[in-house]
Structure formats: C-alpha cells, structure tokens
Image: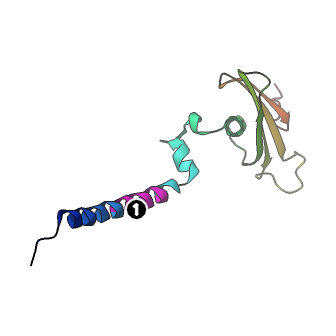
Amino acid sequence: MTAPSVAAQLRRGAGWHLGCAIALLVVAGLLGGCDQQQLTQFRGRVAPDTLGLGDRCALFMQRAMPSAQIDIGDRSSTSPDIRTIIATAQGTRTDLPPGSPVDPNLAVECTFTDSVLTAFRWTKGGPQPSPH
C-alpha cells in the first residue's frame, strides 16, 4: 500500500475547509434573520443610528403620548436642503373605546438638522391641551 500523494491530501483538506465555510455561511444567514427590534435595541434603549428618521419621528410620537397605544402607520421624509430632513409619521390610537369623541388618527412632523431633532409638531390629533 502506498501513501496518498500530497495532491490528494490537499484535495481532502480543501473539502474540509469548504464544509466549514458553508457551515459558517448557514449560521450567518440564521443570525441575519433576527428580529429588527432585537437589532435596534440595547438594554431597553433604541440605538438611533439603526433607525430611519421617519422611524425616529414615530418613536417621538409614541413618547409624546406615553399613555396611548398607537399603531404606527406610514412614515416618510423629505430633505429641503443638505442639512435638514423633515420626517412625518402617522398612527392610529388603538386604546380608545368605540364611539369615542376623540379622533383616533394621529400625525406628527419632525424636523432634524444634522440628524438632531430640532422641531416636533402635531399635524393631526395629539394630546389634549391642559385646562390650566
């Protein structure tokens, strides 16, 4: 019996490396399917650089009405100049009883300058003004 040639040994080693590479790609693909919320949150805080400005505007809308349950709908953004982005978000309150006199539809506009929120305003709905 003769010893396998060096070329045969290299071919077998290459096959093993190819198998490892395929297994690594499968694991990476499975990890890539993680839920977006898991990827954008770190210890209960949202990492702003992982969200678009329309998503950040929707987050500000939810934080402006912390007691309301809001189903977020459309989000969009436009850029009037190179430093400013105006983002909008729409939502529907799901915590109101049927027949409530309060309109469940909400909309906000957020102005970001150099990715920093510089203005926030309700364009539809929003919290009721304080009687004081």
In percent of width and height, residue 1 lies at 9, 79
Which residue type does callout 1 highlight? Ile
How is colour applied across the structure in the image? rainbow
Picture residue at 10% right of the left edge, 74% below the top: 2
Q: Classify 94 as above or below 11.
A: above
Between 16 and 121, the residue placed more toward the observer is 16
At mark 1, the secondary structure is helix
Q: Classify 4 as above or below 124.
A: below
- Magenta region, residue range: 20-30
Between 114 and 4, the residue placed more toward the observer is 4
Magenta region's main secondary structure?
A: helix
Q: Classify 73 as above or below 29.
A: above
Quarter location, residue 109: top right
Quarter location, residue 15: bottom left
User: In the drawing, does residue 59 fall left or right of residue 78?
Assistant: left
Picture residue at 77% right of the left edge, 21% below the top: 81
Picture residue at 52% right of the left edge, 46% below the top: 39
Q: Is residue 127 visible?
A: no
Between 38 and 50, the residue placed more toward the observer is 50
Picture residue at 53% right of the left edge, 57% below the top: 33
Q: Is residue 131 magenta?
A: no
In percent of width and height, residue 70 lies at 74, 47
Q: Is residue 2 visible?
A: yes
Q: Give the labeled residue for mark 1.
A: 22
**Quadrant the C terminus occupies:** top right
